[in-house]
Image: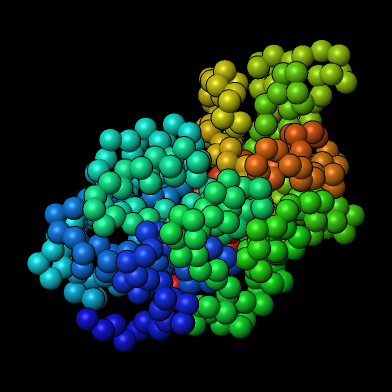
Amino acid sequence: MADKGLRFSPKQLRVLTWWHDPGREALICDGAVRSGKTFAMGLSFFLWAQAEFDGRQFGICGKTIASVRRNLLSELVPCLRRLGMEVRDRRGEHLLTVRFRGHENRFLLFGGRDESSAALIQGSTLAGVLLDEAALMPRSFVEQAAARCSVAGSRLWFNCNPEGPQHWFYQEWILKAEERRALRLHFTMEDNPVLTERIRERYRRNCSGAFYRRFVLGEWAEAEGRVYDFFDPERDAAKAPEDGFSAWRVSADYGTVNPASFGLWGLREGVWYRVREFYYDSRKAGRQRTDAEYAEDLERLAGGREIQRVIVDPSAASFMETLRRRGFRVVKADNDVADGIRVTADLLRAGRVVICGDCQDCLREIAQYCWERRGERDAPRKKDDHAMDDLRYFAMDLVKEREEDGFLALAVDRGEDF
């Protein structure tokens, strides 16, 4: 069963063997990105399931089913096959069937994106569940998944990167690990034996503020100060290239009472430049604009250029329909704020998206876009954030496109996390 390509740190080996301890009912692995927790936990989960059960059903959960496949299964399934497991993937059913040494079990894939996701797993009877990125899932979904594990000998497996110290998962699971008979293992990048010092240094260099403390140091740290604290508008705003653009797109945050913000993006030599913008504050102007008027504003912003697509605020259904009737290809934006901020920060740092000097409202907002406490979680302050929203929409659309092409931004690229 040996796989000569695998190397494990002492902490990863603890993950692989923890389930032999009859006094533990759960495993929690938290800490830095690229620290090796995800792959080790996934491998241990399948080894445990196939050794201890036959004919049972298990759950594997991520924020989305796509993220489960990307973050965990893309690396893990080939390894399981090298170890001698027969793995059949029924993608349409979100199901893996695994056979090994005479035992056959079923592994159902679930996405825990929002509060409604709890209904997806309700009613299942599971012998165990693995929750990847547990801190990004709603509490209702995580608790429902745990409640489904009613088979004798069932166990819970959690991994995540840190959020703020008031986060419910930190308060209810990590601080109460012993009370819940859970083994908590905290990972750093040094716990990943295949991660080079060059890669570690890249992450140290590319993160700052709360992102550095959470993703590099692995701390459950408060987010405070500016969201994009590494970006200096005076230093980092660029002059728009005069020509050489090969594609054009528009990102749009729609507002009637609140301001509307549109960004015009041009692609040149692999970099997307926000070259121009439209920004309208109805309170300051003293008059709200209609969908048709906003569509005309967007057409003027496009300036006769061929626009590949317009990425629009997902709540703006009537505006999207107005744009479609005018011949635009419209894409509903991904409005995940936490992921959007991480992806945007990565793309800005990497120079894959650039804000040009003519985008004064975007530069004004990015200079004052700050964190605040909202209940149990940190969130950006909901004030002067409309250009920041359309910036996020563009970044999330771009990284989704690049995922499909095999490229991932740093925040979501976890191919080395084993």
Residue 179 as seen in the image, left or right of residue 190: left
Q: Nearer the viewer, residue 77 or 181?
A: 181
Residue 257 as seen in the image, left or right of residue 405: right
Quarter of the C terminus within the rendering:
bottom left
Image height of 261 relative to 152, above or below: above
Asked if residue 107 shows in the view, the reply is no
- Where residue 251 sits: x, y (%)? 65, 37
Quarter of the N terminus within the rendering:
bottom left
Residue 310, picture quadrant: top right
Residue at (58, 41) in percent of width and height: 336
Image height of 159 relative to 401, above or below: below
Q: How many marks?
A: 0
Residue at (82, 13) in percent of width and height: 287
Asked if residue 235 shows in the view, the reply is yes
Image height of 362 relative to 44, above or below: above
The residue furthest left is 102
- Where residue 149 sits: x, y (%)? 31, 48
The residue furthest bottom is 4
Residue 88 as seen in the image, left or right of residue 204: left
Q: Nearer the viewer, residue 156 or 335?
A: 156
- Where residue 59 sits: x, y (%)? 31, 50
- Where residue 415 sits: x, y (%)? 46, 67
Q: Nearer the viewer, residue 39 or 387?
A: 39
Q: Nearer the viewer, residue 292 or 149?
A: 149
Q: How is the image coloured?
A: rainbow
Residue 410 as seen in the image, left or right of residue 242: left
Image height of 255 relative to 166, above or below: above
Residue 264, picture quadrant: top right
Residue at (74, 52) in percent of width and height: 223
